[in-house]
Amino acid sequence: MNKIIVEIDDLSNVKRFISILEDLKYVKFYTAEKEEFKNLAPLTDENWIKPGRPATDEEFEAMIKECEQEYESGLSMTSEQAKSLTLEKIAAWRKKSSR
């Protein structure tokens, strides 16, 4: 398999390009990256629990690194502690959102 990345700046040309791809029998898969998700500020701790844009690869890597550091430093918690903390954060978020 070979991968090609194409950047097209005009939406009408994107639609035209995709229609061409769909006609090609040898194209097995394509995906379109939404421009609205590019160049956004990184997700904050509060954003992780909210629905919205998907996390980037860099943000997932940062989250995994943070978890590994907490585990290595002994700051990890039990599943019950994590559940309790999560429920507290959700309750606080709901209270803040209902204002």
Image (cartoon, rainbow, N blue to C red):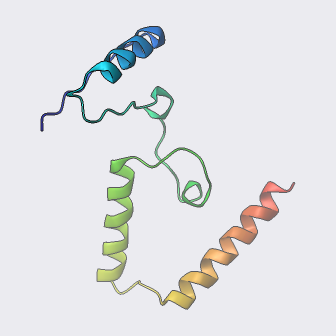
The residue drawn where x is 72% and y is 62% is 93
Is residue 84 placed above or below 91 in the rendered structure?
Answer: below
The total number of labels drawn is 0
* Foreground of the two, 6 or 22: 22
Judge left or right: residue 52 versus residue 55.
Answer: right
Judge left or right: residue 93 versus residue 54.
Answer: right
The answer to which quarter of the image holds residue 1 is: top left
* Foreground of the two, 21 or 62: 21
Is residue 86 placed above or below 55 in the rendered structure?
Answer: below
The answer to which quarter of the image holds residue 64 is: bottom left
Q: Residue furthest right?
A: 99
The residue drawn where x is 61% and y is 52% is 51
* Foreground of the two, 84 or 18: 18
Image quarter (top left, top right, bottom left or bottom right) of the C terminus? bottom right
Is residue 9 placed above or below 67 in the rendered structure?
Answer: above
User: Whole-percent x and y of residue 58?
Assistant: 33, 49
The answer to which quarter of the image holds residue 76 is: bottom left
The residue drawn where x is 59% and y is 58% is 46
The residue drawn where x is 12% and y is 34% is 2
Judge left or right: residue 1 versus residue 67.
Answer: left
User: Whole-percent x and y of residue 94?
Assistant: 77, 63
* Foreground of the two, 38 or 41: 38
User: Whole-percent x and y of residue 56?
Assistant: 39, 46
